[in-house]
Image (cartoon, grey):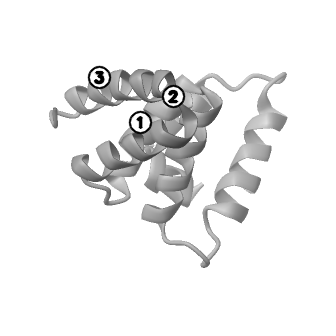
Amino acid sequence: MTVRREVLSDAHVDRANAGITEFTSDFQDFITRTAWGDIWSRPGLDRRSRSVAVLTAMIALGHHEEFAMHVAAARRNGLSVAEIKEVILQAGLYCGVPAANVAFKLAQQVLAELGEA
């Protein structure tokens, strides 16, 4: 939970936890243990590198809500606005221009909310 809070923010995790029901509790536990306890906590990549990988994967797969959430996480993990732009440009080459177009729109919205665009 510590890593999840550090990457996504206390506010995000608190919102996610507030919506936990008996139906979703096992899934939330799975996410916390697997994604944040196992993968994001591994020493093989730093958080900046993990953010680059996640942003690219979310663009490629069209997971727009997750992409937007991870733009803010990437900033917390030390990626600059210019580096996020480069990730989207790179993904545009390999994932397609339409995917990058949506990613730029979403990233700009998130960065504006953060006061950075």
**Residue 3 percent across, percent down from the top left:** 54, 59
How far from the left and from the top, in percent, is residue 111? 25, 33
Q: Looking at the image, do the residues carrying marks 2 and 1 touch, with CB atoms under 8 Å apart?
A: yes
Work out whether mark 3 precedes mark 1 in sequence or the reverse, and give the earlier one.
1
Mark 2, Cα crowd under 10 Å, few <14 / some 14-19 / many 20+, is: few
Q: Residue at the front extreme?
A: 93
- 47 vs 71: above or below: below
Residue 109 got which mark? 3
Q: Split into 4 quadrants, where in the image is the N terminus? A: bottom right
Q: Amino acid type of disc 1?
A: Ala
Q: For this view, does 39 lie left or right of residue 103?
A: right
Left or right: residue 26 compared with residue 74 = right
User: Residue 85, how many percent across, how many down?
Assistant: 30, 43
- Position of 28 relative to 19 (above/below): below
The quarter in which the C terminus is drawn is top left
What residue do we see at 48% from left, 40% from top? 93
Residue closer to the observer: 65 or 32: 65
Given this view, does label 3 or label 1 mark the residue nearer the observer?
Answer: 3
Residue most toward the bottom?
Answer: 43
Label 1 neighbour load within 10 Å: few <14, some 14-19, many 20+: few
Q: Where is mark 1, residue-wise?
A: 11
